[in-house]
Image: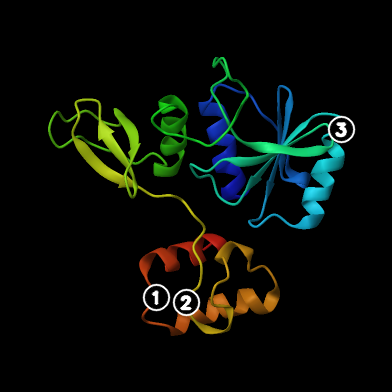
Amino acid sequence: MNKQEQQYYDYLLNLGYTPKHFPEKHSFLIPNVYLKVCDFPVSDFIRQQAKEASKKMVIMLLHGNLTFDSYTVFHEGDECAEGFLTKSNSKYSPIYYGEMDVEYFPEEAKCIADVIINGKKLVCPRCKKVNKFIVGKNIHYKATCVCGTWITNISSNKPIKLHFGKYAGREISSMIQKEEVDYLKWALSNMTTLKKNVIDAINSHLGI
């Protein structure tokens, strides 16, 4: 299971589901929904496959990294709406059809944030509680302690892109051809101005 799929798997567990994983298809199955992990933007081919498959069951395309975004849902042979996964005990489970609003869905937002921070301890500077926070948003997503104190901003977890060279604009995770991988290795060895998040993303992608 790659990092992207692992994040979705952990998120599904946090929501209270026991997902069945199909590694060769990069997908999961939970009650009443088939979840396909795919690149962003989603290709027309994948959309057409989802449309056909949705004649038998609901399909949700989990495009790109786990974020606070909503995802495309197909049902009865059509693209029906945007939606996001909800807690297994929610009255909306498994899918709420609409945009993710972290204030209206605090439990789901916390489940996403817990995966994104990946075990990091967020300590309240005032009351010293650890990882007892709610997710809010102004310009950025943020973790605010249950006591009301701001702790930190939360990464949107969007895929890191290259902003230089012949592959400028490409998501690092999408660079899988030999010449693309060789370029990433060259950049690590020869470019001294790479930002830490770019270095970390390349290392993770290359399995270093």
| Distance in Å between CA atoms under marks 1 and 3 | 47 Å
Mark 3 surroundings within 10 Å by alpha-carbon count, few (fewer than 14), some (14 through 19), many (20 or more): some
N-terminal of the pair, mark 1 or mark 3, is 3
The residue beneath circle 2 is 188
Label annotation for residue 55 = 3
For the view shown, which residue lies furthest in the left direction?
126
On the rendered structure, is 89 left or right of 120? right
Q: Quadrant of residue 77?
A: top right
Looking at the image, which residue is at 44% across and 33% down?
Answer: 109
Confirm whether residue 207 shows in the render: no
Q: Are marks 1 and 3 in contact (CB under 8 Å)?
A: no
In depth, the one of 1 and 73 nearer the eye is: 73
The residue beneath circle 1 is 194
What count of labels does the image hold? 3
Above or below, comparing residue 107 to residue 153 in the picture: above
Q: Identity of the amino acid at label 1?
A: Leu
N-terminal of the pair, mark 2 or mark 3, is 3
Q: Quadrant of residue 39?
A: bottom right
Q: Residue 48 location in percent, x, y?
A: 83, 49
Looking at the image, which residue is at 55% across and 14% down?
Answer: 89
